[in-house]
Image: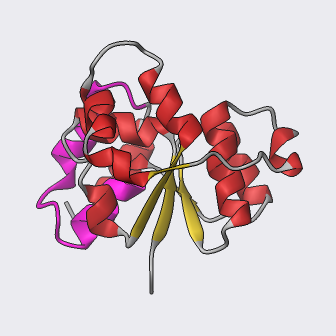
Amino acid sequence: MVKRWVVNTSPIISLTKIDRIQLLSELCDEVVIPQGVADEINLGGYADSAVIWLQQTGQAYIKPAPEIDSRIASWDLGLGESQVLSWAVKHPGYEAIIDDLAARKAAKVLQIPVRGTLAVIVLGKQMGYISSVKQDLENLVQVGLRISPTLLAQAIALVGE
């Protein structure tokens, strides 16, 4: 089965901070980053790991911003989340890679497949790209990704660590 992902800002930032951004291209067949997501990452005005990756390797994944679907606009999400979900609506077969809770709720209502950064790491382990997820998950917490201790424990148990 072909995997197609449209990726939001937070997963890109988090994965670059823990040096796992390559998982995006390793785990799926097509990666899309809407222009608004790229703009959000570049907004900081400084060269962090996400900005550097986006200007280099990530440049190949940037696509023009889709028109925001009216059903998504009504959720009052951020620009990146709105573009990611709108892309997924307009291009069936894409899974939204998104961490924002409100956006995840909108995706569920709109029946858009979704996974977050944590699930990308778990999939990386399941597919053999990561030998141990525990350290990566702890690193995600250290770089600011909010993961409940219960969810963290469930993810570690899921992969048998």
Query: Main SS of the magenta segment?
Result: helix
Residue 123 sits inside the magenta stretch: yes
Question: The C terminus is located in which quarter?
Answer: bottom left
Question: The N terminus is located in which quarter?
Answer: bottom left
* 9, 123: nearer the viewer: 9
Q: From the viewer's perspective, is 12 left or right of 89?
A: left
Using the rendered view, name the quadrant where residue 109 is placed.
bottom right
Task: Residue 103 in the image: state x and y as whole percent.
Answer: 67, 43
Which residue is located at x 25 percent, y 41 percent?
56
Whether residue 72 is visible, yes or no, is yes
Which residue is located at x 65 percent, y 61 percent?
88
Q: Which segment is the magenta one?
A: 119-145
Whether residue 154 is visible, yes or no, is no
Residue farthest toward the bottom in the current orientation of the protein: 1
Which residue is located at x 73 percent, y 62 percent?
89
Using the rendered view, name the quadrant where residue 140 is placed.
top left
Colour mode? Answer: secondary structure
* 70, 18: nearer the viewer: 70
Q: How many marks?
A: 0
Residue farthest toward the top in the current orientation of the protein: 45
- Compared to residue 44, the image places residue 118 above or below, namely below
Residue 95 sits inside the magenta stretch: no
Task: Residue 47 in the image: state x and y as whole percent.
Answer: 27, 19
Task: Residue 59 in the image: state x and y as whole percent.
Answer: 36, 45
Q: From the viewer's perspective, is 88 left or right of 152?
A: right
- Compared to residue 98, the image places residue 30 above or below, namely below
Q: From the viewer's perspective, is 134 left or right of 143?
A: left
Task: Residue 60 in the image: state x and y as whole percent.
Answer: 36, 53
Which residue is located at x 51 percent, y 29 percent?
39
